[in-house]
Image (tube, rainbow, N blue to C red):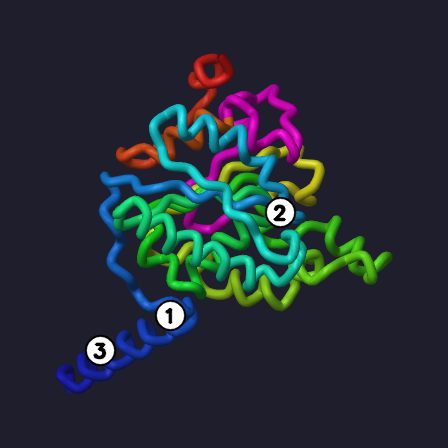
Amino acid sequence: MLATVAVLLAVAVAVAVTVVVRRSGATPVRPVALDRPGPVLLIPGYGGAVGSLQPLARRLRAAGKDATVVRLPGGGTGDLAEQARAVGAAARRALARTGATSVDVVGYSAGGVVARLWAREGGGRSIARRVVTLGSPHHGTQLAGLAASLAPDQCPTACRQLTPGSALLARLNSGDETPDGPLWVSIWSTVDDVVIPPDSARLEGALDLTVQDVCPRSRVPHSALPTDPVVTGIVLAELAPTPLALFSTVDCERLSS
């Protein structure tokens, strides 16, 4: 009798594990070497403005990193899945050019959602070492929802995909929001004026950092995240060949200078 119960319990556990894995939508992958950073890909936000990330790219290069801002198709307002495929192509070019075995990714605003799509659905989990998102509307933004309802003709595909509860976001956030492979970091501002509500940038399973966790008086808006010295300092630390860094208010003065 006890043996029968043990067998039934084992079968039940196996079924439960299978269900969890299937719900996560992700097959386990072997993480890349965390102590060997490769080139850095920076993904612009909605509209694809590469200039918004050039200051951060220059700062990364000054620190000795190979940094490239990815140019997105469709002016950065088309299908986010297509943008994710462009990131995949950029990653393959970066690996071929440098001979590295992995890349680091920094996604700003909608670029963070694109990075997640590439990691989850485009094979990026097997080559991404770290994925850092800056003020990304992982669960949508009410601004996109407002545009979609009041001016649908002026809300392109990416805009509609960034509305809270969109089919794309529902798919992306089902199961595990941070599938295994890379280490995940989400950096955001509690006073973000584009990602509404700001905590839409929370990413379950990621190291979650607000600028105000470090500098409580910071009023950095969405547009200034890529150039804010505190954010830049955090990004540099999180892309180091060391474990993910933890920050507190004692680091504010150092990062702000």
Between discs 3 and 2, the one toward the N terminus: 3
Q: Nearer the viewer, residue 138 or 2?
A: 138
Between discs 3 and 1, the one toward the N terminus: 3
Residue 30 location, quadrant: bottom left
- Which residue is the extreme one toward the left? 3
- Say which amino acid is labelled 2: Gly
Between discs 1 and 2, the one toward the N terminus: 1
Q: Which residue is mark 2?
A: 48
Judge from the rendering whether residue 219 lies leftward or rightward of residue 211; answer left or right.
right
Q: Which residue is mark 1?
A: 20
For disc 1, the neighbor class at 10 Å (few under 14, some 14 to 19, many from 20) is some
Q: Quadrant of the N terminus?
A: bottom left
Query: Disc 3 and disc 1: Cα gap in Å?
Result: 15 Å
Residue 214 screen position, x and y as percent = 49, 24
- Say which amino acid is labelled 1: Val
Judge from the rendering whether residue 96 lies leftward or rightward of residue 164; answer left or right.
left
Q: Which mark is residue 10?
A: 3
Q: Is residue 162 visible in this depiction of the protein?
A: no
Residue 32 among magenta residues: no
Region of the chain picked out in magenta, as a range: 201-230
81 up-or-down from 94: above or below: below
Query: Disc 3 and disc 2: Cα gap in Å?
Result: 50 Å
Residue 122 location, quadrant: bottom left
Query: Disc 1 and disc 2: Cα gap in Å?
Result: 36 Å
* Residue at figure coordinates x 33%, y 36% from the top left: 244
- Say which amino acid is labelled 3: Ala
105 up-or-down from 6: above or below: above
Q: Nearer the viewer, residue 123 or 9?
A: 123
Q: Secondary structure at mark 2?
A: loop
* Residue at figure coordinates x 66%, y 36% from the top left: 192
Q: Secondary structure at mark 1?
A: helix
